[in-house]
Amino acid sequence: MGIYRPLRAALFIYECLRLMVLMWVFSFLKPGGGAGIFPWPVYAVPNALFPLMTLFLWRQFSRYAAYISLYVSGKCIALASVIGFCVFSWHNISAALYLRNTGAFMVLGSLLFLLMGDLFSTTGGLALAGKSRKSAAAGVPAALPAESSGENGGK
């Protein structure tokens, strides 16, 4: 049971980094080079739910374990959308890479970070779902009360 708490913490940290990378990519890819980026964060803001979900799962797993399937479903959709973006934008990305555009290398690195991280978080979510199912089948709570309430420093 000790490995699941650091896993939940790692998922939370990744989701926070993921949101920052998404905001950076959207601001970098703003069309027309305009000074304002207002409409583009609107596409990234719904992704703020992922850090919130992982924060709740990290702090009170037994209380929020029922939402793991929602988290995994959202991560599958996010993974499919990043893969779709890469497929449909590959011509533009490869042309920018051919011109040795530094920004294109940064965007490509960001997309690889998102792909690998989303694979990690989907796998971690599935592991947490399996833990939740095993605990429910055994009739034991998914986490000890001290762990779920955050007492004892999370030990």
Image (cartoon, rainbow, N blue to C red):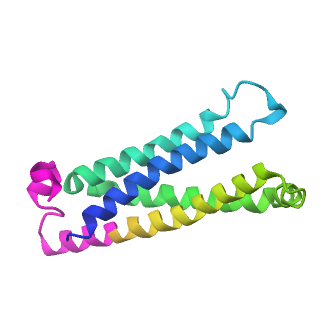
- Towards the viewer: 140 or 107: 107
Q: Is residue 9 above or below residue 46?
A: below
Q: Quadrant of the C terminus?
A: bottom left
Q: What residue is at 74 percent from the left and 41 percent from the top?
A: 29
Based on the picture, tell me whether residue 23 belongs to the magenta stretch: no
Q: What residue is at 73 percent from the left and 60 percent from the top?
A: 86
Q: Quadrant of residue 7?
A: bottom left
Q: Is residue 100 above or below residue 25?
A: below
Whether residue 94 sits left or right of residue 84 in the image: it is right
Q: Is residue 26 above or below residue 14?
A: above
- Towards the viewer: 44 or 106: 106
Based on the picture, tell me whether residue 137 belongs to the magenta stretch: yes
- Towards the viewer: 31 or 104: 104
Q: Quadrant of residue 127?
A: bottom left
Image coordinates of residue 123 in percent, x first then y, are: 44, 70
Q: Quadrant of the N terminus?
A: bottom left
Q: Read off the magenta span.
A: 128-155
Image coordinates of residue 75 in percent, x first then y, are: 50, 58
Whether residue 12 sits left or right of residue 150 in the image: it is right
Whether residue 90 sits left or right of residue 113 in the image: it is right
Q: Quadrant of residue 78?
A: bottom right
Q: What residue is at 56 percent from the left and 66 percent from the top?
A: 116
Q: What residue is at 52 percent from the left and 45 percent from the top?
A: 19
Image coordinates of residue 73 in percent, x first then y, are: 47, 59
Whether residue 93 sits left or right of residue 80 in the image: it is right
